[in-house]
Amino acid sequence: MMAEKTGGTSRDPALLRVVAEMYYERKLSQREISELISSSIPTVSRMLAEAERRNIVQIRVIKETPDTTDLEKLLTKKLGGTFIVTGGQHSNPRTESRLTGVGAARHIVGMLPPKGLVGWASGHTTSALVESLGNTPLPRLDSVALVGGWDDHQSHLDSNALVRSFAEKTGGNAFTLSSPAWLPTAEAREAILSHPMIQSTLSLWPEVDIAITGSGMPPDTASNYFTVADRWESKLRDEMVRRGVVGDICGAIFTIDGDFIRSDLTDHFVLPSLEQIQAFPTTVAVLGGHAKVKSLIGLSRTKLADVIITDQHCAEGVLDYLAS
């Protein structure tokens, strides 16, 4: 058999096939293979890559598994609505949150319109989602911040950083909201909302075609990363714990029963009204991990999210909680 010449080297397809069989089917390590064929480990690595390029090896990633599909159906049966369940890894809250965002990315890309306006609320999960998008050319799709910034030093709590990152990957425009997410007094909130620069951003909210948000965890839950609740004043946080808050959607906070919480302190938030959130044509919430079981249940019961994307561990936790 005549060897084919690829990349300046001549390798027999039969040899490539044997190397691929040893690695993928017999589960030998590259070191073991290198010793068997008297080649270096880097050479074995290059041979495996060449076998893939020449379709001797065809790698296919199964997008969904029966387990996650069954979980989606069970969540819909128990809570109503539409769910997408991704894979995940049982770990700490930060890792679980970020992996949920990474797993959600391809689903979000399929939901984005080719042109229009997407609204973003910041969080660890949505930040990881945008980071994992790669180059996604959508130059006619602009983005707007839906919540003010919680912390300029923690990029995942800054909606402006999120919309800028999304715009860099898509080529669209980014419309920022130059305001804190929470102000110490209602008067301060009204003053900043009256500023022309802020008004120009707020005027875009009714034009949003799809809103993408995460959800915070219950404020009394320990976490290994900075959360929105960590940025609340102690008085506000204590009140939210006392009143049973378990999460938020675009900053609007709710209980496990799906009831929204209002108080003098929550009136200091800079975020869309419930009526504005309801008016978004499509709202997608992305949240996962064992710490957000109650958050997902409460979020589903608000009926404000058209689609909820979560990970397998959170989905299983929700079903276990509801069964108990």
Image (cartoon, rainbow, N blue to C red):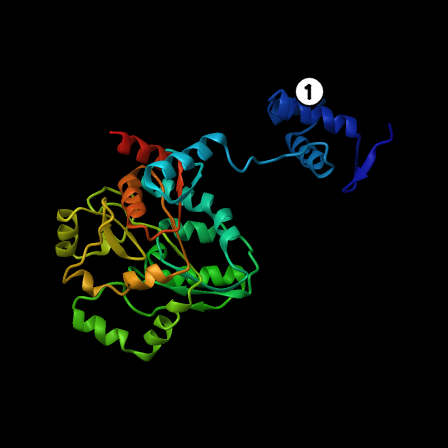
Question: What residue occupies the far right of the structure in this picture?
Answer: 2
Question: Which residue is painted at 76% across and 26% down in the image?
Answer: 15
Residue name at image x 30 percent, y 30 percent: 320
Q: Is residue 226 left or right of residue 45?
A: left
Query: In this image, 87 relative to 263: left or right?
Result: right
Q: For residue 157, which quarter of the picture?
A: bottom left
How far from the left and from the top, in percent, is residue 231?
Answer: 23, 56
Q: Where's the C terminus, which quadrant?
A: top left
Q: Nearer the viewer, residue 226 or 65?
A: 65
Out of 126 and 17, give the one closest to the viewer: 126
Q: Circle 1 sits on which residue?
A: 36
Q: Is residue 38 visible?
A: no
**Among all residues in the image, which is located at the extreme bottom?**
196
Q: How many marks?
A: 1
Residue 187: tell me if it is visible: yes
Residue 289 at x, y percent in the picture: 34, 39
Residue 60 position in % (x across, y down) = 61, 35
In the image, residue 291 lies at what x, y percent?
29, 39
Residue drawn at x 12%, y 47% as measured from the top left: 242
